[in-house]
Every structure is written in structure tokens, then in C-alpha cells.
Image (cartoon, grey):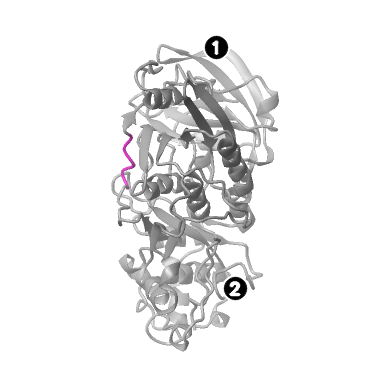
Amino acid sequence: MKKTFQFACSLLLLAFIFMGCDDQHDNDVPNEIAVNNFVWKGLNLYYLWQADVPTLSDYRFENQSQLNAYLYNYASPANLFQDLLNKPSSKFPAGEAIDRFSVIFADYTQLEGILSGTTKNNGADFALYYKDETRTSIFGVVRYILPNSDAATKPIGRGDIFYAIDGQTLNVDNYASLLNRDTYTMNLADYDGGNITPNGNSVSLTRSILSENPVHIHTVINEGVHKIGYLMYNGFYPSYEPELNNAFGEFKSQSITELVLDLRYNGGGSVETATHLASMITGQFTGQVFAKEQWNAKVEDFYAANNPANLYNLFSSTINSNAAINSLGLNKVYILTSAATASASELVINGLEPYINVVQIGDVTVGKNVGSVTLYDSPTFAKKDLSTKHRYAMQLLVLKIVNKVGFGDYVNGLQPDDLLKENLGNMGVLGDTTEPLLSMAITRIIGGGRPANRVPGKTFKTVKDDRSLSQLKNEMYLETIPEGLVFE
């Protein structure tokens, strides 16, 4: 059942004390700091680590005038936002950063498009790697091609390597600007025993607005008595739940005996859609706890006084369109992962493990156990009665998520049962039984009668992938926020 936040708010909570002293009124906020006011108040109310940031304390400012004076110190809302985060990755190195994922957008329509799988895209999904230990030079590898894109019409495909854009060799200083152009030419290279050697070929690509169906491949593989369903799923986009459910309907109609779920390039998405995917894999746990949300003290108190059950995400029998879920009733699932597997993908793995046998094959995942929600500048921070002064919105980390038994501490990633990184010299064809990660899963399923296609290769440190070049990356998000938790 679709999770909503419909609460009958008590007078106590409607009179929520703001900043411990005088009431604060947005009509006392000058236009030039309206966005900054929205940023501070949104973080003060919802931010997961609000209690750990002194400037976000309820008692930091005695009144709106004092808050205004502070906000005038920031000409850029983005700079204020970064200064209010708890050890953000923009200011702290890997290993020390706490908030790696909260972001702010100047135009919420761009944010909404990314969350729904609609972006300006040329269709060549890629990953970037450092060429050597100096971590200065960079090269890219195409992972897959989106249908109906510009790249789908060009001579480029999975495994192709590029070392330059428009003739400029990629490095740590220029890659972001070069790859964010609407039109560019990829200069290609060969993978020569681990060396990246220019080959003189190139391909020109142009971006257009694309909506990606995350159900990239679904097929049934017959291996003796085994009927193996294979699904490559690349994003938890709520609007594509019917397509996901239809794929499981086909698996169910063909009576598959095992499922290989390929999440290697899936950076996450909707918590609700992740819950529905887990329900499709199983089906025998409807109504039981799939995951539990942990918010800051303010929101936890609000839930406790209103509807504590809304902290729980339960296995469901329907998708968001209220159509019945095509569940498989499996007691084991094989999940393929990589260093790009994050957030809602990790939630599926972690949420299923107390119930069924989850066999993880591939690389260590990102380690994102926290979720976000979109905050708009409105009296309730929802997309209703929006401010007409700007179009800023925040995708703010507001919760940590744990499984049925309370485990959710995997900030260093989920460790695979079979460690197998993609070999850039032997990427294989996605969905083909000889593709190395899928081959390993099939070997696990049928036993030792079929050798795994496990060819060792040189490994490279990942820089970023196509998705994380944008502001938003590896999101696990709720589609709505608690109604009634407001400032008075």
C-alpha cells in the first residue's frame, strides 16, 4: 500500500517552538535573504544531524532579526547550505566527511527530473577512472547505451574507452566542465593490456531530454533444470513501477526457479519503490517490516505523538498504481553489485537479508544508509503554496534507514559474497551468460558444472560515473514529508 503522511496534528505540535524563544515570522524576512531563510529553517527542522550543527540549534538566535543578520553574511544560498551541513564532502576528505549527499538546486524542476529519471542526456552511460596512482589523468568507459538516444544511433557501445573530449585530454581539473557540454566529441582509445592507447577514432554526441526506463534488460535463461530470471534494473523511479511489475509478471508466467537482480549501475531512488521491488522478489512477507526510518529528535517526537507506524516501511501486495504485485515467493536471490551500487539498491539487499538468502556478487557498494526528501520553500516545506520569489529546493538527508533487526551501519559499503570487479578488458555483453558477473551468478546457481567466466584484469580507482557528474547522486528518497510539522 502506498505510504502517506496523513496526521491529525495536536495543538502542542502545531504550536511547535521555533528556536526556543520569540516566534519567527517569514514576513519579517527581506526579499534578498528569502532563500537563505528557507535554507536555514528547512535544515533546522528536518536535517538528520541538526543536533550536531551548532548554528542550527533552536537557541542559536533569539529572534528573526538576529537570524536575518546572520543570513546577510551569505550572498550565495549554496555557500550557506554547505556551511550548515555536518562535515560535508565538499569540505572534508573521504573518511572524514559525514554528509556526502545533501544537495541544493536553484531550480526544483531540474531536481524533479533527475529523481524521476528524466535528464538532459546523450545516452552513453559511462564511468570515469584514474589512469594511474598519481590520480591526475582520467579516462572513461561506456557501460551501456540508452535506447532512443543520440548515442543509440552512433558507433559507440559498452566497453568503449575514451581518453579526451573535443581533443582535450581528461584530467581532474577539466573533466566535469568538458563532460557537461550539450554537444561534444569523445576521443576514443584501446585498452592495451591495461594501458589506455589513443586509436584515432572519435564519436560526436548531443544531449536531449530523455526519460530512462530503468528496466533495462529482463530475460529468462535456461540452464538445465534451472529457469533463471535476469533483470538489469538501473533506477528506483516511481513512475516506472508498472514496467517493473510487468517484468516480474513475465518471470512469474514462465515459472522461473531463480532470480539474478543486476543493480551494478543502480544509484538508488524511491524508498517506496525499493520496498515494492523487495515485495516482488518475495510475496510471503506482506505486512511485515521491510525497513525502519530513524529521523532527528524533532521528527521522531512528532511521529511518536501522531502515528509511530509511519516510521515503518512494510512489504506490500500492491504497487503505487494499486495494481497487484507480481510476487515470486523466492527464498533466495542473487544480486550483482559494483562500486556504483548505492542507497535504495543497498536498502533492498539489507532489507531482504533478515528474511531470505541474499547472495551478493561483484564489488563493494557505495555505503549510503541515509535517505533524503525534497524540501520546497512553502509554509510546510511541501510543494504547496510555494514561494514566488525563487525556485530553490533542497534534497536534504533527513533519515537513516535500518532493516527489521535494526542493522543499517554500512557506511563503508556492503561486502559481496563473491568479490568480482568488472574487468575493463572483458566487459562482456549485458544479459549474456558469458558476461563475467552474470556468469558467476549462474555458476553459483547450477554448481560446479559450468566454469565461471572470471578473467582477472587490472583494476582502476573509480572517479565518478555519468550520474554523479550532476549535483544529485546516489539518492534514496521519500516522496512526501510529514504533514503538520511546521513553525508557528
Residue at left offset 35%, top offset 59%: 86
Q: Is residue 190 above or below residue 59?
A: above
Q: Give, as a three-letter code, the residue at label 1.
A: Asn
Residue 329 drawn at (x, y percent): 47, 44
Res 173 visible: no
Q: Is residue 162 above or below residue 13?
A: above
Distance of mark 2 from mark 1, alpha carbons? 55 Å
Residue at left offset 60%, top offset 14%: 201
Residue at left offset 30%, top offset 53%: 407
User: Circle 1 sits in a helix, a strand or a loop, which is it?
Assistant: strand
Please identify, in this view, whether the residue under mark 2 or under mark 1 is nearer the observer. Answer: 1
Which mark is drawn over residue 199?
1
Front one among 383 and 57? 383
User: Circle 2 sits in a helix, a strand or a loop, which is it?
Assistant: helix
Q: Give, as a three-letter code, the residue at label 2.
A: Asn
Dot 2 crowding, Cα within 10 Å, few <14, some 14–19, many 20+? few
412 inside magenta stretch: yes
Answer with the quarter of the image where residue 300 lies.
bottom left
Write the start and end of the magenta stretch as one range.
411-416
Residue 82 drawn at (x, y percent): 43, 57
Nearer-N-terminus badge (2/1): 2
Front one among 13 and 17? 13
Residue located beneath label 2 in the image: 31
Residue 42 drawn at (x, y percent): 48, 69
Residue 466 drawn at (x, y percent): 53, 36
Secondary structure mainly formed by the magenta segment: loop
328 inside magenta stretch: no
Quadrant that contains the N terminus: bottom right
Dot 1 crowding, Cα within 10 Å, few <14, some 14–19, many 20+? few
